[in-house]
Image: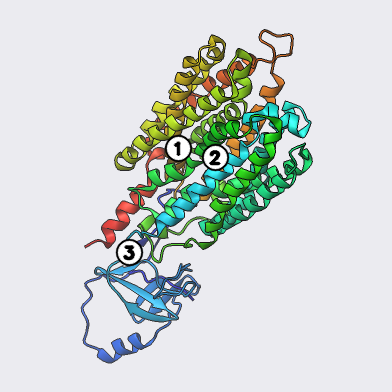
Amino acid sequence: MPFSRRPKSKEISLTDNPNTTTTTATTPPDDHVDDGNSSEKKAADDDPMPTSTRGGPGFGKLGDEEYELRDVDTSGSRDDPGGLPRVAGGVEGGRRFNATNGSVLEGTATEYRTYKRRWFGLAQLTLLNVIVSWDWLTFAPVASNAAAYYNVSESAINWLSTAFLFAFVAIFPVTIRILHWGPKPSFMTAAALLLIGNWVRYAGSHSRSGGNYAVVMFGQILTGLAQPFVLAAPTRYSDLWFTNRGRVAATALTSLANPLGAALGQLIVPFWVSTPSDMSPGVLYVSIISTVASLPAFFIPARPPSPVAPSSETLKLGIRESFSIVSRSLELWLLLVPYAFYVGFFNSISSLLNQMMNPYGFSDEEAGIAGALLIVVGLVASAITSPVLDRTKKFLLAVKAAVPVIGLCYLVFVWMPETRNIAGPYVVLAVLGASSFSLVPVALELLIELSHPVSPEVTSTIAWAGGQLLGALFIIISDALQAGDAANPPRNMKNALIFQAVIAVAIVPLPMLLGLFGRSDRVSLRRVRSDQQGTAQTGP
């Protein structure tokens, strides 16, 4: 049985959570002097497997020393094949003890290191997030041409975006389970769905004379099912491959690749599709790009040969226990709720930006540039703030600074389209992008810090699923709030803009309450503290 060698005077704790039970074994002091009985010592050394002295499976004995027994999942490497049992966490006198196949080996102090191969997986996750978001906005930026090509209404084209978001919510429980196994199975699942979904969409769009809306909808749902497997993966991947000095930046790069794909879709698709008959080659181009971006997912490394940090090898809680902890944590919900709402509004405004601006005389190209500006400025801002936050760890301060700015931007944007001056929407959307994109990675990492040792994919997937669900609902509500043909101007979305502004401002106070009213201990960075303690214990 895999077991962990622990000195008896060592306190064993699996979590920083004060509600978690801690087991301590009592024994003679470590400076016990050998009585010279070499035969007894040799007999102990010759007994490779532990024997229970407490009447249960949780403890064993090697010679005169007693140890905690626990299952250890080893990832495997060139010298240590995956799946073999070994001792984990046994450190005594600066030395680490390992066991493989029941034999005990004495080694050196634990060394944590990062691997260059992590960049291959990071690049692949970035590509997948770009293309899955581009798939989402293949049709929305050219809604009028798409409606004419498929012979449906613009509302039906909006449903292509809405169904994509609902697909995330439908499959997110499966996403958590697969991500719990590791990032690579999640990458491969997403790649397979993207390959199939894109070519199904093209099968419904291969003729220049008109397309099959039902077939395209089926393909769109398949690509929507792929999204959670890559959108919820960045925190899981950064936790496995990066230290706390680089996790925010890694999460930012891969998470914000998703809106980058949306920007590319808004910017490029209108130039490809200038008439209804251009929809067929436009869908083909996206399918080819998706294929090229998806194929490498099957060849990336699954996990590092050895842990990169103490928190990487911390025993994570099971999915059921993780959900229980999340459901009972006020701090997590004060962060999850605004995150989900702001992601939902971003999804809504990205899908409907053309329809918000076109009635006031703005062209599809101008609206596409506005959407791209929203995202590009956000990416630049996140590229600046993420490395700084990696070093300073001022996660809570960053959240409290970004949220009021986001709420204010949604409020001001209510009046921007009717100015009929493109500068106004450009400026407000640029500020909205900078504040929103700075918030995304730090909020995801803060959720993990506050819930450690809950497995990262749990809070990440819940946060994104909430955002996708609300985004789909906001698109439906905004579409219903669109003015009629008799309005001035016809078909304007002023009521939809007011709707999103009111809610965006109303939820601003929620994250501002974090750490107040004597609850500052509930917002400590648990994973960072775990890394610092683990490094101190195993260092020279």
Q: Secondary structure at mark 2?
A: helix
* Classed neighbour count for the residue bearing mark 1: other residues with Cα under 10 Å, few (<14), some (14–19), many (≥20): many
From the top left corner, tell me how far across and down residue 254 is, in percent. 46, 45
Give the residue type that dot 2 points to: Ala
Separation of marks 3 and 2 at Cα, in angstroms: 37 Å
Residue 464 seen anywhere in this rendered image of the structure? yes
Specify the quadrant of the image occupied by residue 25: bottom left
The image's mark for residue 301 is none
Closer to us: 104 or 68: 104
Separation of marks 2 and 1 at Cα, in angstroms: 10 Å
Closer to us: 13 or 216: 216
Give the residue type that dot 1 points to: Ala
Q: Are marks 2 and 1 in contact (CB under 8 Å)?
A: yes
Q: Residue at x 73, y 13 (%)?
A: 484
Query: Taking 269 as reference, is 448 above or below it?
Result: below
Residue 456 seen anywhere in this rendered image of the structure? no
Closer to us: 208 or 235: 208
From the top left corner, tell me how far across and down residue 427 is, in percent. 44, 19
Report the residue that reaches farthest toward the bottom.
39
Q: Secondary structure at mark 1?
A: helix
- Which of marks 1 and 2 precedes in the sequence? 1
Residue at label 3?
10
Residue at label 2?
463
Q: Secondary structure at mark 3?
A: loop
